[in-house]
Amino acid sequence: MPDFIFSSARPSLSKWRDYTLAQAASFVAKNGTVIVCAVSQPYLPFLNNWLISISRQKHQDKVLVIAEDYATLYKVNERWPGHAVLVPPAPDAQTAHKFGSQGFFNFTSRRPRHLLHILELGYNVMYNDVDMVWLADPFPYLQGNHDVYFTDDMKAVKPLKHSHALPAPGKKGRTYICSCMIFLRPTTGAKLVMKKWIEELQVQPWSKAKKSNDQPAFNWALNKTAGGVDLYLLPQAAFPTGGLYFKNLTWVQETKGMHVIIHNNYITGFEKKIKRFRDFGLWLVDDHALESPLGRV
């Protein structure tokens, strides 16, 4: 860790430009594990909401925020030194947050490179989107020594004791696994999936017609490596997609007490996501901001 970062004299925030992913991972890792998110400035309220929920489970110290613009890098490290890093070059901040845009694709397509780098440094890594809320500790669910753990993005209800194998492909010839919540061990298999994900993103670049995100490429990577990699589907009751949790209230009642991480997907737009979180009592920043390591942002 560079001396300037934790010296008693308050360093210029611009010094964080030289902070590397290797230094940051080394600083935050606990028990060989890092929890990672990637955030651009418009998502800071969601980052804070997510951090409050993680703090309640006592896992906030291992969080590393991969800042996708310098404003986020400086803001997080000013409040919480050492917990944000920017891997240059910074994407275009104006376009990085509109789902389906080329900017959003460029922003998310950096994700497997960051994750692969952390694996190559020898750490377990959990990736989360920040439009998620933890209701319980997910780590007890990461049983065994599988290479890659993930969640299904399909809203169809599964049996409570469903298979943990990769599901059958859907209509497009591939599965619908969410690239929003992934846990990886630093194994040859997990690294292979990340390399294949990067390769698939290069094969299927963004175009105006397709307006893709990085999730189809992640699914192709899983499907094409499944024979040689130990994959594990996490239980739906604990890790439901937003299309199930926010839409099927009967299922929510039937599975009460089983929910671990809730993803506010199947909806786009900041205001709509915030309203939905508020409606379900999951927008924590209004009343509990001081529980976040960042305080009020």
Image (cartoon, rainbow, N blue to C red):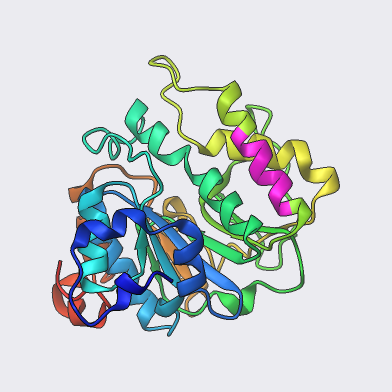
Question: Percent from the top left, x then y, of residue 105?
Answer: 41, 32
The structure residue drawn at horizontal position 27% and vertical position 68%, both measured from the top left corner, is 49
Q: Nearer the viewer, residue 73 or 238?
A: 73
Q: Is residue 38 left or right of residue 232?
A: left
Question: Percent from the top left, x then y, of residue 102?
Answer: 36, 26
Whether residue 11 is visible, yes or no, is: yes
Q: Nearer the viewer, residue 126 or 253?
A: 126
The structure residue drawn at horizontal position 55% and vertical position 45%, both measured from the top left corner, is 112
In the image, residue 189 sits, relative to residue 99, either above or below, namely below
Tell me if residue 192 is in the magenta stretch: yes
Q: Quadrant of the C terminus?
A: bottom left
The structure residue drawn at horizontal position 21% and vertical position 72%, both measured from the top left corner, is 79
Q: Is residue 98 left or right of residue 143?
A: left
Q: Which residues are magenta?
A: 190-198
Tell me if residue 248 is in the magenta stretch: no
The structure residue drawn at horizontal position 76% and vertical position 73%, both measured from the top left corner, is 144
Q: Quadrant of the N terminus?
A: bottom left
